[in-house]
Image (cartoon, rainbow, N blue to C red):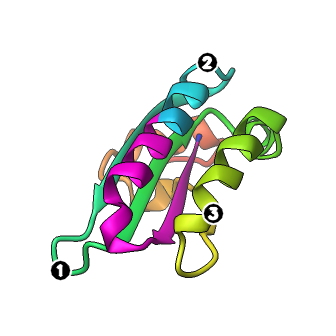
Amino acid sequence: MVKVIIERHCQPDKAAEVERLLMDLRSGALQQRGYVSGETLRSVDDPSHWLVISTWLDEGLWRAWESSPERQEIVDRLRPFLTTSEKASVFSFVWEACWWPEARQYRGASAS
């Protein structure tokens, strides 16, 4: 699984429009193969700063949605409200950080 973190800085006075478009993106993602979950966050200290964190079964399934015409159409409608380009980062889980030692068997390493 992977986590996708998308960071956006938007015009603070356009929060309602931004929220509506982010909901459209979430609705579209829900229909995609591989989408697991997501959440949308807005900074308490900086209301122009938004994060969308989603979980996908794998990077390829995320990339398929990322490049889809449906998503691009919504992103194009969101773009006028951005003050900087959005930044998307994809992260994989780090099993070594897991508190559950038996998790090692699932990635093929021997337990120590």
Determine the CA span between mark 3 and mark 2. 22 Å
Residue 66 in the image: above or below residue 24: below
- Image quadrant holding the C terminus, namely bottom left
Residue identified by numbered label 1: 45
Q: How many marks?
A: 3
Residue 65 lies in quadrant: top right
Characterize the local packing of mark 3: few (<14), some (14-19) or many (20 or more) Cα atoms within 10 angstroms: some
Nearest to the eye among marks 1 and 3: give it.
3
Given residues 71 and 17, the one toward you in this image is 17
Percent coordinates x, y for residue 5 in the rendering: 51, 59
Determine the CA span between mark 1 and mark 3. 22 Å
The amino acid at mark 2 is Gln
- Determine if the magenta segment contains residue 12: yes
Give the magenta part as a residue range: 2-23
Residue identified by numbered label 2: 31
For image coordinates 64% across by 51% down, the residue present is 77
Percent coordinates x, y for residue 109 in the rendering: 62, 48
For image coordinates 47% across by 45% down, the residue present is 22
Q: Is residue 62 visible?
A: no
- Determine if the magenta segment contains residue 104: no
Given residues 58 and 78, the one toward you in this image is 78
Residue 17 in the image: above or below residue 90: above
Q: Is residue 14 visible?
A: yes
Q: Earlier in the sequence, mark 3 or mark 2?
A: 2
For image coordinates 41% across by 61% down, the residue present is 51
Residue identified by numbered label 3: 79
Is the residue under label 1 in contact with that under label 2 (CB below 8 Å)? no
- Tag 3 secondary structure: helix
Query: In the image, is 60 to the left or to the right of 98?
Result: right
Percent coordinates x, y for residue 90 in the rendering: 63, 59
Characterize the local packing of mark 1: few (<14), some (14-19) or many (20 or more) Cα atoms within 10 angstroms: few
